[in-house]
Image: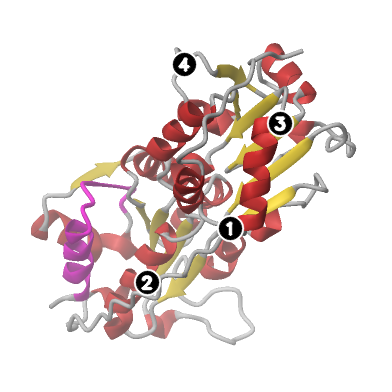
Amino acid sequence: MKASDFIAEFLMKKGIKSVFELSGGMITHILDSLNQKTDINIITMHHEQSAAFAAEAYARVTGLPGIALATSGPGATNLLTGIGSCYFDSTPAIFITGQVNRHELKGDREIRQLGFQETDIVTMAKPVTKACFQVTDANDIPNIFESAFKIALEGRPGPVLIDIPMDTQRIQIEDNSLVVNDVKDLEINFDILHNLIGDIQKAKRPLILSGRGIKASKSQDLFDEFIKKTQIPVVTTLLGLDTINYDNSQRVGFIGSYGNRWANIAFGECDLLIVLGSRLDIRQTGADVKFIENRKIYHIDYEKGEVNNRVKGCEAIITDLNFFFKEFKKSVFNIFFCFKRRLE
Protein backbone atom coordinates (compact mmCIF):
# COMPACT_ATOMS: atom_id res chain seq x y z
CA MET A 1 0.00 0.00 0.00
CA LYS A 2 1.22 3.49 -0.83
CA ALA A 3 2.05 5.37 2.39
CA SER A 4 -0.24 8.30 1.60
CA ASP A 5 -3.09 5.86 0.87
CA PHE A 6 -2.58 4.35 4.31
CA ILE A 7 -2.78 7.80 5.93
CA ALA A 8 -6.02 8.59 4.12
CA GLU A 9 -7.66 5.27 4.98
CA PHE A 10 -6.40 5.45 8.57
CA LEU A 11 -8.15 8.80 9.08
CA MET A 12 -11.34 7.44 7.54
CA LYS A 13 -11.29 4.38 9.84
CA LYS A 14 -10.88 6.67 12.85
CA GLY A 15 -14.14 8.38 11.97
CA ILE A 16 -12.74 11.62 10.57
CA LYS A 17 -15.31 13.22 8.26
CA SER A 18 -13.50 16.46 7.32
CA VAL A 19 -9.93 17.72 7.10
CA PHE A 20 -8.73 21.28 6.59
CA GLU A 21 -5.83 22.33 4.37
CA LEU A 22 -4.21 24.74 1.98
CA SER A 23 -2.67 22.94 -0.97
CA GLY A 24 1.08 22.85 -1.42
CA GLY A 25 3.67 20.73 -3.19
CA MET A 26 4.83 18.73 -0.21
CA ILE A 27 1.36 17.39 0.70
CA THR A 28 0.09 16.59 -2.80
CA HIS A 29 0.38 12.81 -2.34
CA ILE A 30 -1.67 12.89 0.86
CA LEU A 31 -4.32 15.18 -0.61
CA ASP A 32 -4.58 12.99 -3.71
CA SER A 33 -5.02 9.88 -1.57
CA LEU A 34 -7.68 11.57 0.56
CA ASN A 35 -9.52 12.52 -2.61
CA GLN A 36 -9.14 9.18 -4.40
CA LYS A 37 -9.44 6.68 -1.55
CA THR A 38 -11.93 8.15 0.94
CA ASP A 39 -15.16 10.07 1.33
CA ILE A 40 -13.51 12.52 3.72
CA ASN A 41 -14.52 16.10 3.01
CA ILE A 42 -11.39 18.08 2.09
CA ILE A 43 -11.99 21.71 3.01
CA THR A 44 -9.55 24.15 1.43
CA MET A 45 -8.94 27.34 3.39
CA HIS A 46 -7.36 30.62 2.27
CA HIS A 47 -4.62 30.44 4.91
CA GLU A 48 -3.02 27.65 6.95
CA GLN A 49 -3.78 29.46 10.20
CA SER A 50 -7.47 29.29 9.29
CA ALA A 51 -7.08 25.55 8.66
CA ALA A 52 -5.56 25.13 12.13
CA PHE A 53 -8.40 26.99 13.84
CA ALA A 54 -10.98 25.09 11.80
CA ALA A 55 -9.43 21.82 12.96
CA GLU A 56 -9.63 23.06 16.55
CA ALA A 57 -13.33 23.88 16.12
CA TYR A 58 -13.96 20.47 14.54
CA ALA A 59 -12.40 18.77 17.57
CA ARG A 60 -14.48 20.79 20.04
CA VAL A 61 -17.70 19.88 18.23
CA THR A 62 -17.01 16.19 17.50
CA GLY A 63 -14.66 15.12 20.30
CA LEU A 64 -12.36 13.61 17.66
CA PRO A 65 -8.95 15.09 16.86
CA GLY A 66 -9.17 17.88 14.32
CA ILE A 67 -6.97 17.36 11.27
CA ALA A 68 -5.14 20.14 9.42
CA LEU A 69 -2.57 19.76 6.64
CA ALA A 70 0.01 22.21 5.32
CA THR A 71 3.00 22.14 3.03
CA SER A 72 6.56 22.72 4.17
CA GLY A 73 8.16 26.04 5.12
CA PRO A 74 5.69 28.93 5.38
CA GLY A 75 2.76 26.54 5.18
CA ALA A 76 3.95 24.70 8.28
CA THR A 77 4.91 27.81 10.24
CA ASN A 78 1.51 29.37 9.52
CA LEU A 79 -0.08 26.55 11.53
CA LEU A 80 1.78 27.44 14.72
CA THR A 81 -0.71 29.93 16.20
CA GLY A 82 -3.54 27.43 15.81
CA ILE A 83 -1.37 24.65 17.23
CA GLY A 84 -0.66 26.83 20.25
CA SER A 85 -4.36 27.50 20.71
CA CYS A 86 -5.06 23.76 20.79
CA TYR A 87 -2.24 23.22 23.27
CA PHE A 88 -3.26 25.87 25.78
CA ASP A 89 -6.98 25.10 25.48
CA SER A 90 -6.47 21.31 25.68
CA THR A 91 -8.02 20.50 22.31
CA PRO A 92 -7.07 17.24 20.54
CA ALA A 93 -5.71 17.77 17.04
CA ILE A 94 -3.26 16.25 14.58
CA PHE A 95 -1.32 18.59 12.32
CA ILE A 96 0.23 16.97 9.26
CA THR A 97 2.98 18.89 7.52
CA GLY A 98 4.74 18.02 4.31
CA GLN A 99 8.52 18.20 4.23
CA VAL A 100 11.23 18.12 1.58
CA ASN A 101 12.59 14.77 0.46
CA ARG A 102 14.83 13.11 3.02
CA HIS A 103 17.95 13.53 0.89
CA GLU A 104 17.24 17.28 0.82
CA LEU A 105 17.23 17.71 4.60
CA LYS A 106 20.22 19.75 5.76
CA GLY A 107 20.89 17.59 8.79
CA ASP A 108 23.95 18.79 10.72
CA ARG A 109 25.32 20.89 7.88
CA GLU A 110 26.14 24.45 8.93
CA ILE A 111 23.69 25.95 6.48
CA ARG A 112 20.24 27.39 6.93
CA GLN A 113 18.43 25.38 4.28
CA LEU A 114 19.13 22.71 1.68
CA GLY A 115 15.78 21.70 0.18
CA PHE A 116 13.31 24.27 -1.16
CA GLN A 117 11.31 25.71 1.76
CA GLU A 118 12.95 23.23 4.16
CA THR A 119 12.08 24.27 7.72
CA ASP A 120 12.63 22.46 11.01
CA ILE A 121 8.97 22.64 12.05
CA VAL A 122 9.39 19.86 14.61
CA THR A 123 11.73 21.92 16.78
CA MET A 124 9.48 24.96 16.44
CA ALA A 125 6.32 23.07 17.38
CA LYS A 126 7.65 21.05 20.32
CA PRO A 127 6.92 23.70 23.00
CA VAL A 128 3.23 23.84 22.00
CA THR A 129 2.46 20.18 21.28
CA LYS A 130 2.09 17.02 23.31
CA ALA A 131 4.35 15.23 20.83
CA CYS A 132 6.08 15.81 17.49
CA PHE A 133 7.12 13.18 14.98
CA GLN A 134 9.21 13.40 11.81
CA VAL A 135 8.96 10.36 9.57
CA THR A 136 12.41 8.97 8.72
CA ASP A 137 11.23 5.51 7.67
CA ALA A 138 7.96 5.20 5.80
CA ASN A 139 7.27 1.85 7.49
CA ASP A 140 6.96 3.71 10.79
CA ILE A 141 3.95 5.68 9.53
CA PRO A 142 1.28 3.23 10.84
CA ASN A 143 2.69 3.22 14.37
CA ILE A 144 3.27 6.98 14.33
CA PHE A 145 -0.34 7.69 13.39
CA GLU A 146 -1.69 5.24 15.98
CA SER A 147 0.49 6.90 18.62
CA ALA A 148 -0.50 10.39 17.51
CA PHE A 149 -4.22 9.64 17.89
CA LYS A 150 -3.70 8.08 21.30
CA ILE A 151 -1.54 10.92 22.58
CA ALA A 152 -3.89 13.63 21.30
CA LEU A 153 -6.86 12.14 23.16
CA GLU A 154 -5.47 10.61 26.35
CA GLY A 155 -5.14 12.42 29.67
CA ARG A 156 -5.21 16.14 29.08
CA PRO A 157 -5.94 16.40 25.33
CA GLY A 158 -3.80 18.43 22.98
CA PRO A 159 -2.16 18.70 19.56
CA VAL A 160 0.34 16.39 17.90
CA LEU A 161 2.41 17.26 14.84
CA ILE A 162 3.56 14.77 12.20
CA ASP A 163 6.13 16.01 9.67
CA ILE A 164 6.29 13.77 6.59
CA PRO A 165 9.04 14.11 3.94
CA MET A 166 7.59 13.92 0.46
CA ASP A 167 9.52 10.83 -0.64
CA THR A 168 8.15 8.79 2.29
CA GLN A 169 4.59 9.61 1.22
CA ARG A 170 4.89 7.68 -2.04
CA ILE A 171 6.71 4.57 -0.76
CA GLN A 172 4.90 1.22 -0.60
CA ILE A 173 4.45 0.11 3.03
CA GLU A 174 2.68 -2.55 5.09
CA ASP A 175 0.35 -1.81 7.96
CA ASN A 176 2.40 -3.16 10.84
CA SER A 177 0.91 -0.94 13.54
CA LEU A 178 0.71 -2.24 17.07
CA VAL A 179 -2.16 -1.00 19.22
CA VAL A 180 -0.83 -0.85 22.76
CA ASN A 181 -3.48 -0.48 25.45
CA ASP A 182 -1.27 0.89 28.21
CA VAL A 183 -4.07 2.82 29.89
CA LYS A 184 -2.93 4.61 33.01
CA ASP A 185 -4.58 3.31 36.17
CA LEU A 186 -6.63 6.10 37.72
CA GLU A 187 -6.44 6.79 41.43
CA ILE A 188 -8.07 9.17 43.89
CA ASN A 189 -7.27 10.24 47.43
CA PHE A 190 -10.38 9.04 49.27
CA ASP A 191 -9.47 10.88 52.47
CA ILE A 192 -9.58 14.20 50.62
CA LEU A 193 -12.72 13.13 48.76
CA HIS A 194 -14.50 12.41 52.05
CA ASN A 195 -13.27 15.73 53.47
CA LEU A 196 -14.77 17.44 50.42
CA ILE A 197 -18.12 15.77 51.02
CA GLY A 198 -18.08 16.90 54.65
CA ASP A 199 -17.13 20.46 53.71
CA ILE A 200 -19.98 20.63 51.18
CA GLN A 201 -22.40 19.73 53.95
CA LYS A 202 -20.98 22.41 56.29
CA ALA A 203 -20.50 25.24 53.79
CA LYS A 204 -22.74 28.31 53.86
CA ARG A 205 -21.67 29.80 50.53
CA PRO A 206 -20.29 26.93 48.39
CA LEU A 207 -19.51 27.51 44.73
CA ILE A 208 -18.39 25.41 41.78
CA LEU A 209 -16.02 26.75 39.11
CA SER A 210 -16.35 24.74 35.90
CA GLY A 211 -13.76 25.02 33.16
CA ARG A 212 -12.78 23.59 29.82
CA GLY A 213 -11.70 20.35 31.49
CA ILE A 214 -15.34 19.26 31.79
CA LYS A 215 -15.61 18.96 28.02
CA ALA A 216 -12.02 17.82 27.50
CA SER A 217 -12.57 14.84 29.81
CA LYS A 218 -15.93 14.02 28.17
CA SER A 219 -17.62 14.43 31.54
CA GLN A 220 -20.60 16.65 30.70
CA ASP A 221 -23.31 14.17 31.70
CA LEU A 222 -21.49 13.29 34.93
CA PHE A 223 -21.03 16.98 35.71
CA ASP A 224 -24.77 17.53 35.22
CA GLU A 225 -25.44 14.78 37.74
CA PHE A 226 -22.86 16.24 40.13
CA ILE A 227 -24.42 19.71 40.28
CA LYS A 228 -27.94 18.28 40.47
CA LYS A 229 -26.91 16.11 43.42
CA THR A 230 -25.02 18.80 45.34
CA GLN A 231 -27.31 21.74 44.40
CA ILE A 232 -24.28 24.05 44.51
CA PRO A 233 -24.33 27.27 42.43
CA VAL A 234 -21.99 27.28 39.42
CA VAL A 235 -19.76 29.90 37.88
CA THR A 236 -17.78 29.13 34.73
CA THR A 237 -14.60 30.17 33.03
CA LEU A 238 -14.84 31.68 29.56
CA LEU A 239 -13.99 28.32 27.98
CA GLY A 240 -16.43 26.58 30.32
CA LEU A 241 -19.45 28.65 29.32
CA ASP A 242 -21.12 25.70 27.66
CA THR A 243 -20.75 23.37 30.64
CA ILE A 244 -24.07 24.53 32.13
CA ASN A 245 -27.26 25.62 30.39
CA TYR A 246 -28.16 29.29 30.53
CA ASP A 247 -31.59 28.48 31.94
CA ASN A 248 -30.22 26.31 34.75
CA SER A 249 -31.22 27.89 38.06
CA GLN A 250 -27.83 27.02 39.55
CA ARG A 251 -25.95 29.02 36.93
CA VAL A 252 -24.56 32.30 38.29
CA GLY A 253 -22.51 33.47 35.31
CA PHE A 254 -18.93 33.44 34.11
CA ILE A 255 -15.98 34.95 35.93
CA GLY A 256 -12.83 36.81 35.07
CA SER A 257 -11.70 40.07 33.49
CA TYR A 258 -14.48 39.88 30.90
CA GLY A 259 -16.96 38.08 33.13
CA ASN A 260 -20.18 39.04 34.89
CA ARG A 261 -19.85 41.34 37.90
CA TRP A 262 -22.28 39.29 39.98
CA ALA A 263 -20.39 36.08 39.17
CA ASN A 264 -17.11 37.68 40.22
CA ILE A 265 -18.69 38.82 43.49
CA ALA A 266 -19.92 35.29 44.19
CA PHE A 267 -16.49 33.95 43.27
CA GLY A 268 -14.81 36.34 45.67
CA GLU A 269 -17.17 35.74 48.61
CA CYS A 270 -17.72 31.98 48.60
CA ASP A 271 -16.51 30.03 51.62
CA LEU A 272 -16.02 26.79 49.69
CA LEU A 273 -14.79 26.66 46.09
CA ILE A 274 -14.69 23.46 44.04
CA VAL A 275 -12.52 23.96 40.95
CA LEU A 276 -13.24 21.50 38.12
CA GLY A 277 -11.04 21.56 35.05
CA SER A 278 -9.65 25.09 35.42
CA ARG A 279 -6.16 26.27 36.32
CA LEU A 280 -7.18 29.38 38.30
CA ASP A 281 -5.59 31.79 35.88
CA ILE A 282 -4.60 35.30 36.96
CA ARG A 283 -7.47 36.69 34.87
CA GLN A 284 -9.85 34.67 37.00
CA THR A 285 -8.55 35.29 40.51
CA GLY A 286 -6.71 38.56 40.00
CA ALA A 287 -3.19 39.15 41.22
CA ASP A 288 -4.12 38.85 44.91
CA VAL A 289 -2.00 36.00 46.22
CA LYS A 290 -4.24 35.88 49.31
CA PHE A 291 -7.17 34.54 47.27
CA ILE A 292 -7.13 31.39 49.43
CA GLU A 293 -7.93 33.33 52.63
CA ASN A 294 -11.39 32.94 54.18
CA ARG A 295 -12.29 30.02 51.97
CA LYS A 296 -11.51 26.36 51.38
CA ILE A 297 -10.55 25.42 47.84
CA TYR A 298 -10.67 21.92 46.39
CA HIS A 299 -8.91 21.77 43.04
CA ILE A 300 -9.59 18.71 40.88
CA ASP A 301 -7.31 18.44 37.85
CA TYR A 302 -5.56 15.76 35.81
CA GLU A 303 -2.22 17.60 35.77
CA LYS A 304 -0.47 17.91 39.11
CA GLY A 305 1.51 20.95 37.95
CA GLU A 306 -1.65 23.02 37.49
CA VAL A 307 -2.70 22.67 41.16
CA ASN A 308 -1.17 24.95 43.81
CA ASN A 309 0.75 26.63 41.04
CA ARG A 310 -0.18 30.28 41.51
CA VAL A 311 -2.98 30.02 44.07
CA LYS A 312 -1.40 28.15 46.96
CA GLY A 313 -3.08 26.14 49.71
CA CYS A 314 -5.64 24.24 47.65
CA GLU A 315 -6.70 20.72 48.57
CA ALA A 316 -5.54 18.78 45.52
CA ILE A 317 -7.36 15.85 43.94
CA ILE A 318 -5.16 14.78 41.02
CA THR A 319 -7.20 12.56 38.75
CA ASP A 320 -9.30 12.48 35.63
CA LEU A 321 -12.55 14.43 36.09
CA ASN A 322 -14.60 11.62 34.62
CA PHE A 323 -13.20 9.26 37.24
CA PHE A 324 -13.67 11.83 40.02
CA PHE A 325 -17.36 12.27 39.26
CA LYS A 326 -17.94 8.51 39.26
CA GLU A 327 -16.17 8.04 42.59
CA PHE A 328 -18.00 11.02 44.11
CA LYS A 329 -21.33 9.61 42.95
CA LYS A 330 -20.62 6.27 44.61
CA SER A 331 -19.47 7.98 47.83
CA VAL A 332 -22.60 10.15 48.22
CA PHE A 333 -25.21 7.62 47.13
CA ASN A 334 -27.02 7.79 50.47
CA ILE A 335 -26.29 11.45 51.24
CA PHE A 336 -28.83 14.21 50.76
CA PHE A 337 -27.28 17.66 50.36
CA CYS A 338 -29.44 20.47 51.60
CA PHE A 339 -28.41 24.02 52.34
CA LYS A 340 -29.91 27.45 51.92
CA ARG A 341 -28.48 28.71 48.66
CA ARG A 342 -27.42 32.27 49.20
CA LEU A 343 -24.62 34.58 48.17
CA GLU A 344 -23.97 37.02 50.97
Foreground disc of the pair 2, 3: 3
Say the numbered circle drawn on residue 248.
4
* Start-end of magenta stretch: 3-23
Amino acid type at image mark 1: Val
Determine the secondary structure under disc 4.
loop
Mark with earlier residue (4, 2): 2
Taking the magenta stretch, the answer to whether it contains residue 13 is yes
Mark with earlier residue (4, 3): 3
Residues marked 1 and 2 touching at CB (< 8 Å): no
Instruction: Say if 154 sits above or below 45 in the image.
Output: below
Q: Residues within 10 Å of mark 4 (few under 14, many from 20)?
A: few
Instruction: Say if 247 sits above or below 141 in the image.
Output: above
Which residue lies at the image location 14% right of the left edge and 54% below the top edge?
A: 35
Q: Position of residue 296 (x, y in %)?
A: 77, 38
Q: Which of 249/279 is in front?
A: 249
Residues marked 1 and 3 touching at CB (< 8 Å): no
Residues marked 4 and 3 touching at CB (< 8 Å): no
Instruction: Say if 335 sits above or below 92 in the image.
Output: above
Mark with earlier residue (2, 3): 2
Q: Residues within 10 Å of mark 3 (few under 14, many from 20)?
A: some
- Where residue 215 sits, quadrant-wise, is top left
Foreground disc of the pair 4, 2: 4
Whole-angstrom CA distance, mark 4 to mark 2, is 40 Å
Which residue lies at the image location 42% right of the left edge and 43% below the top edge?
A: 219
Residue annotated with mark 1: 128
Say the numbered circle drawn on residue 239.
none
Residue annotated with mark 2: 147
Foreground disc of the pair 1, 3: 3
Residue annotated with mark 3: 202
Q: Position of residue 56 (x, y in %)?
A: 42, 43
In what quadrant of the picture does the N terminus appear?
Answer: bottom left
